[in-house]
Amino acid sequence: MGLFPFGKKELLQEPEKERLVQAIRTAERLTSGEIRLFVESRCSYVDPMDRAQEIFLSLGMEKTKQHNGVLLYVALKDRQFAILGDKGIHDKVGDHFWQKEAHLLKVHFSQQRVVEGMEECIKEIGESLHTHFPYASGDENELPDDIIFGR
């Protein structure tokens, strides 16, 4: 037992984690694209996109065959986020798509519906990946579907 009898508060509760992992699995079922969710308490960078780029590379997301990985980065306590798509998907959807998804997250976050916002964002990213990178026989899940938790 540690010095203090209580544990560190989880950023997400188990049912929330399960919902989000299921959203990723459902979104990826019809595409060769990959979606990762990285959640941490605080963003130590001025620009969350800088943190997302660091995470994207550290997770090897730039190594997918079709360069169609998407990272959803969320710093819960700072209420910051970034959505980063690799070159393959970005070339297909352009800036307008990412701005639309960012707006969706802002609206949900402002209504204290963080998990619902992430879930809906994952769903819409999956639909876009399906449109541009539909599942083909032999496609493999190149990256794990679990949520990565930072500090």
Image: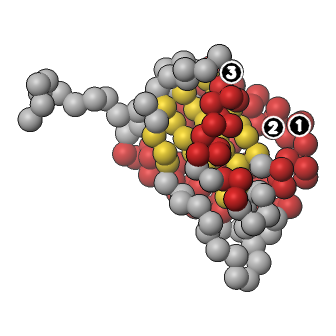
| Total numbered labels placed on residues in the image | 3
Whole-angstrom CA distance, mark 3 to mark 2, is: 16 Å
For numbered disc 2, what is the local secondary structure? helix
For numbered disc 3, what is the local secondary structure? loop
Whole-angstrom CA distance, mark 2 to mark 1, is: 5 Å
Which numbered disc flags the more N-terminal residue, 1 or 3? Answer: 3
* Residue at figure coordinates x 64%, y 74% from the top left: 140
Up-down relation of residue 11 to residue 35 (above or below): above
Which numbered disc flags the more N-terminal residue, 3 or 2? Answer: 3
Q: Is residue 117 visible?
A: no
Residue corresponding to mark 2: 98
Marks 3, 2: nearer the viewer: 3
Badge 1 crowding class, 10 Å Cα cut-off, few under 14, some 14 to 19, many 20 or more, is: few
- In which quadrant of the rendered view does residue 101 lie? top right
Up-down relation of residue 148 to residue 142 (above or below): above
Which of these two is toward me, 50 or 85?
50
Residue corresponding to mark 3: 47
Q: Which mark is residue 42?
A: none
* Residue at figure coordinates x 71%, y 62% from the top left: 64
Which of these two is toward me, 68 or 122?
68
Looking at the image, residue 64 sits to the left or right of residue 40; the answer is right
Badge 2 crowding class, 10 Å Cα cut-off, few under 14, some 14 to 19, many 20 or more, is: some
Q: Do the residues labelled 2 and 1 touch (CB within 8 Å)?
A: yes
* Residue at figure coordinates x 22%, y 31% from the top left: 7
- Three-letter code for the amino acid on which mark 2 is drawn: Trp
Q: Do the residues labelled 1 and 3 touch (CB within 8 Å)?
A: no
Q: Which mark is residue 95?
A: 1
